[in-house]
Amino acid sequence: MTNHIALPLLLASKTDEVNFLKGIRSALDPQLYLSSLFTDELIHWFETMVNNDLAPDVMGTLKSANERTMASVGDMVERTEQLDKKIRNLEVKNATLNNDVAILTADRDDTEIKRRALEVTIAKLQDDQSLMVRRALVDAKKRYEMQQQILKLKALLFDKEHPDNE
């Protein structure tokens, strides 16, 4: 069964034009490619444009939308490339910072080992110093005691050599 469209000789009003498009849509077999062109959305868009006294340039609208989309895609690609570059720069900085952290951590650990070694050395030196001071005090006491004994012995010797001074 074939549908035929009667083309009016005169489309006198905006409503006639819209109804003409609706007639085309209803006359088309849904399996045809043209039926995907004359959708409800297209007819609604056409009707809105005509009612607002705007030229319904489908190809111009599609081309303009495509150009905006392509410009937007181009902007997104450019922005993505900029962001990728920033990410690569940040990854390099992150690797550098991780390396710096590893070096500082190793330095900190080395400093901690040296600090502990110095604490042990200081403690040993303090112990040695305390021992030396104690020994010096003991030696000083012994010298004092020896000097006292020497004085006593000198006095005793003097008394023996000079018995008449008693």
Image: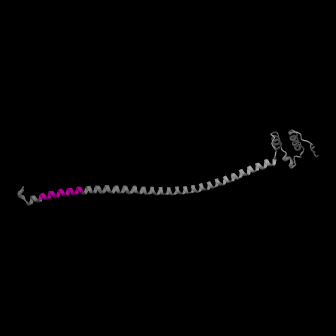
Residue 155 rendering spot, x and y as whole percentages:
12, 57
151 is within the stretch colored magenta: yes
For image coordinates 16% across by 58% down, the residue present is: 150
Give the image quarter of residue 11: top right
In this picture, residue 28 sits left or right of residue 132: right
In which quadrant will I find the C terminus?
A: bottom left
Above-or-below relation of 74 to 10 = below
For image coordinates 48% across by 57% down, the residue present is: 107
Q: Residue furthest left?
A: 164
7 is within the stretch colored magenta: no
Bounds of the magenta segment: 140-156
Give the image quarter of residue 161: bottom left
Comparing 64 with 101, the one in front is: 64
Comparing 107 with 149, the one in front is: 107
Residue 109 rendering spot, x and y as whole percentages:
47, 56
Above-or-below relation of 88 to 25 = below
Q: What secondary structure is the stretch in magenta mostly built from?
A: helix
Above-or-below relation of 18 to 115 = above
Give the image quarter of residue 18: top right
Comparing 161 with 65, the one in front is: 65
In this picture, residue 118 sits left or right of residue 139: right
